[in-house]
Image: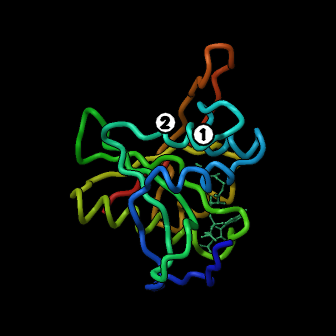
Amino acid sequence: MAVAPRATREDLSLRLASFGPQHAGAVAAWAPTPEALRWLAPSTSFPLTADSVCAWQRPHTRAFVLMTRGGAGPLGYGELNPMRADPLHFWLGHIVVDPRLRGRGLGLALVKRLLDVARFDHRATRVSLIVFPENRGAIRCYESAGFDRAGDELHRFAASDPPMLLQRYEWRP
Ligand SMILES: CC(C)(COP(=O)(O)OP(=O)(O)OC[C@H]1O[C@@H](n2cnc3c(N)ncnc32)[C@H](O)[C@@H]1OP(=O)(O)O)[C@@H](O)C(=O)NCCC(=O)NCCS
């Protein structure tokens, strides 16, 4: 199992690496129940598998795993997707930390590093995400990273499902 120290705002022992198929099995194990998968990926059918994590990768998706500099991990996973209408506007997707390592600052470290990639590698002027209103831990994590509430949105994730209300958050450099 990955051993990760508590992260701090200046923690240099963590880094992002490009996601590869070798990471997919570990990420798939981080949403072990339908409820956990609903918060992470409401459009993905349960159970989450390595194949479904690989299927999240679209041609323009930049997917990353959080690792220690010593090579331990993956500890977390997240995606940056450019919006079709504006290549400087990115969408943050599928943010997740290994459940055994939550509450140690790794989610915040992951999101902050993804924002650095958006800002410094892609000159992003805006990063957005959506989150279920009851996902208080994720909302706190996004707020700590500098995201602001930008309204509510109705989403229908399957034709047979009723529309659900999600909160939209935005970050600007
Ligand atoms: C959301 C998630 C990535 C956060 O990762 P984490 O490593 O536990 O978060 P951190 O330890 O970095 O905490 C960041 C902040 O959120 C707060 N927080 C984290 N989990 C919390 C919880 N369950 N309840 C309340 N606050 C919480 C922390 O106290 C911290 O606040 P602070 O910055 O004011 O000190 C993780 O909980 C996760 O993987 N959740 C399941 C997948 C998911 O729901 N993803 C979001 C999809 S939109």
Q: Which of 69 and 157 is in front in this view?
A: 69
- The quadrant of the image that shows the C terminus is bottom left
- Residues 100 and 102: in front is 100
Estimate the x, y position of residue 29 in percent, counting from the top left.
Answer: 68, 52
Query: Residue 133 placed where, x, y %?
Result: 66, 45
- On screen, residue 151 versus residue 128, left or right, reads right
> Looking at the image, is mark 2 or mark 1 earlier in the sequence?
1
Up the image or down, 83 lies above or below 162; here it is: below
Looking at the rendered structure, the secondary structure element under dot 2 is: helix
The structure residue drawn at horizontal position 50% and vertical position 71%, both measured from the top left corner, is: 67
Q: Mark 2 points at which residue?
A: 55
Residue labelled 1 has its Cβ within 8 Å of some atom of ligand 1 = no
Mark 2 touches mark 1? (CB < 8 Å): no
> Residue drawn 34% across and 58% down?
172
SS state under label 1: loop
Whether disc 2's CB lies below 8 Å from ligand 1 is answered no
Alpha carbon separation for disc pair 2 and 1: 12 Å
| Front residue of 130 and 111 | 111
Quadrant into which the N terminus falls: bottom right
Q: Residue 41's mark?
A: 1
Which quadrant of the render holds ligand 1?
bottom right
Q: Can you tell which quarter of the image residue 26 is in?
A: bottom right
Report the disc number at residue 169: none
